DNA sequence: CGGCTTATTCCTCATGGCAGAAAGAGTTTA
DNA sequence: TAAACTCTTTCTGCCATGAGGAATAAGCCG
């Protein structure tokens, strides 16, 4: 816990304080919460209702409120994306070490992909860390491979109402991606950056994530492509095997 | 997650949503958080500052925000009171089964004690479940034994400015409690309820909690007192041994 | 049935969201 | 290598809207 911010949000403070109390001290009634926070009972009730809504609390048959699943030991390690990150981090590092280029892990998020882990190249000029960011799937190498693995109906659902995307052209590109097994993003999202991506699929063949190598365009060399694709294939295979084993 | 409450607190909703996103998805920048929540960047920053303040987030050297210790797997099991509850629950049950009266665990909280676990007697007329509640320590059996184990300076610090408490009289009572090793609350906090309490001390002799048996005054019998005190002693000894072993 | 507790509703004013500015950090360029 | 540039984080002030509290209704238990 740090110093109180200069411009604290008292409603948020109450809620977080209450959540932490539930975790530390266990079951509590509405009136107990009101006393502990120094607020009206109706306010405490509203705060608890929000905690319940967002899974930070739940109410038992004795009417007391307890920590919800977000605050339980299992939650942090059970979230699918957190699991995937944990599982992929070693492979990301291996991939990066093998290629000396930055390796990214991304997951699908509607028509976008979200970067959830990066192993950065040790070279001075390198693809940077994009963790936390979202980018349009059809502009990103890994995103393209995810789209390529989607059933046509799902692809339509994502893009049929989006005028900015030429759907027939995208389909043709994705057919090529499927054929090759990887996709390239040549400076579509950032000038001077080129990436090679490959989807990670579950046992049923559905894309759950993608790995990509991102490097300065100046270092992109068609002759080295097979090597990068090979390293990506290796990493993807290992992740897929680990996913199947769960 | 439940249905959104009819009268949601949107600021609290933003904060909790953001905390859950950090746990599920991992590191995030301020601008990422703003995008995900659909709020201004400055608002996202204030929310993150509150999350950091309450240990739901922390910021790394890369400026990204990550889950704080409250959201990590270890937090839920590491909180001292949560540990104590977990450790004491079996003894509470044993104590209750042995005496057929309700057994309570309470911890000191300033001049009060807070009830953190109860094993209720199976009898129809019984001491009830007080989990979550706080009561003045000097009116509660377990609280008296905690006060009795405090150094005189600490006792003074708690009560010297409190006119409602006759400190010399309390001192005399606590001296008696120390001599006996247990304390009785005869209807001070609730008409018709009598309780016998005993402190749990750490290796250094400082009181960390107390166990008590609470029963209807109608069942309180001075001839049975040694039996109750014996059972309490047993339970306290086991808890103290377990505490020492950590 | 009574008393306590939880849950809901309405109103008002204090605070949370936003815009803008300042500060910080990393990259690019000369 | 230093300056310029750009993006990002952090800070600040203002005002309208949403959070807190009072009152009421509903629920629960002895």
Image (tube, coloured by chain):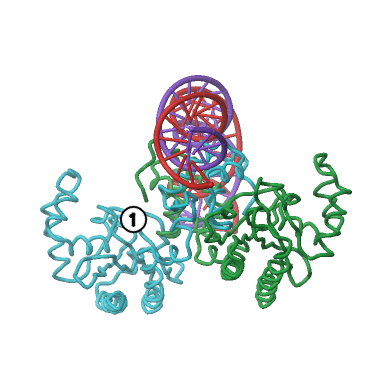
Chain colours: A cyan, B green, C purple, D red
Up the image or down, B47 lies above or below B155; here it is above
Which quadrant: the C terminus of chain B? bottom right
Along the horizontal axis of the image, is A83 left or right of B231?
Answer: left
**Residue B26 position (above or below residue A96):** above
Q: Nearer the viewer, residue D28 or B164?
A: D28
- The location of residue B4, given as percent across then percent down, is 36, 42
Element carrying mark 1: loop
Q: Nearer the viewer, residue B206 or B94?
A: B94
Badge 1 is on which residue?
A190
Q: Is residue A142 visible?
A: yes
Q: Is residue B172 left or right of residue A141?
A: right
Whether residue A80 sits left or right of residue A12 in the image: it is left
Chain letter of disc 1 in the image: A
x 49%, y 54%: residue: A66
The residue lying toward the viewer, choosing from C16 and B129, is B129
Q: Position of residue D5 (x, y in %)?
A: 46, 45
Snapshot quadrant of residue A218: bottom left
Residue B83 appears in the rendering: no
Count the numbered circles shown.
1
- In the rendered structure, the answer to whether residue B198 lies left or right of residue B53 reads right
Rendered residue at 48%/65% (across/down): A73
User: Which residue is painted at 63% across and 46% down in the image?
Assistant: A4
Q: Is residue B54 above or below residue A88?
A: above
Residue A69, horizontal then vertical, whole percent: 43, 58
Q: Nearer the viewer, residue B87 or A201?
A: B87
Residue A18 in percent (x, y) is at 55, 48
Seen in the picture, residue B32 relative to B87 is either above or below; the reply is: above
Q: Counting other residues with Cα less than 10 Å from the Cα at mark 1, is it few (<14), some (14-19), or many (20 or more)?
A: few
């Amino acid at each position: 816990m740090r110093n109180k911010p200069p411009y604290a949000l008292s409603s948020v403070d109450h809620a977080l304080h209450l959540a932490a109390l539930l975790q530390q001290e266990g079951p509590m009634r509405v009136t107990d919460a009101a006393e502990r926070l120094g607020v009206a009972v109706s306010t405490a009730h509203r705060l608890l209702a929000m905690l319940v809504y967002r899974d930070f609390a739940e109410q038992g048959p004795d009417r007391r409120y307890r920590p919800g699943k977000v605050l339980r030991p299992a939650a942090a390690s059970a979230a699918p994306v957190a699991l995937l990150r944990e599982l992929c981090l070693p492979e990301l590092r291996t991939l990066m070490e093998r290629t000396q280029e930055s390796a990214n892990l991304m997951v699908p998020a509607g028509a976008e992909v979200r970067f959830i882990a990066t192993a950065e190249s040790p070279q001075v000029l390198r693809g940077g860390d994009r963790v936390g960011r979202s980018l349009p799937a059809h502009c990103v190498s890994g995103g393209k491979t995810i789209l390529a693995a989607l059933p046509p109906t799902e692809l339509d659902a994502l893009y049929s109402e989006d005028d900015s995307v030429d759907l027939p052209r995208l389909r043709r590109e994705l057919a090529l991606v499927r054929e090759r097994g990887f996709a390239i993003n040549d400076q579509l999202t950032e000038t001077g950056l080129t990436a090679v991506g490959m989807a990670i699929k579950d046992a049923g063949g559905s894309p759950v994530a993608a790995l990509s190598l991102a490097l300065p365009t100046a270092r992109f060399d068609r002759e080295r492509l097979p090597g990068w694709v090979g390293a990506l294939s290796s990493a993807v295979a290992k992740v897929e095997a680990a996913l199947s084993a769960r």
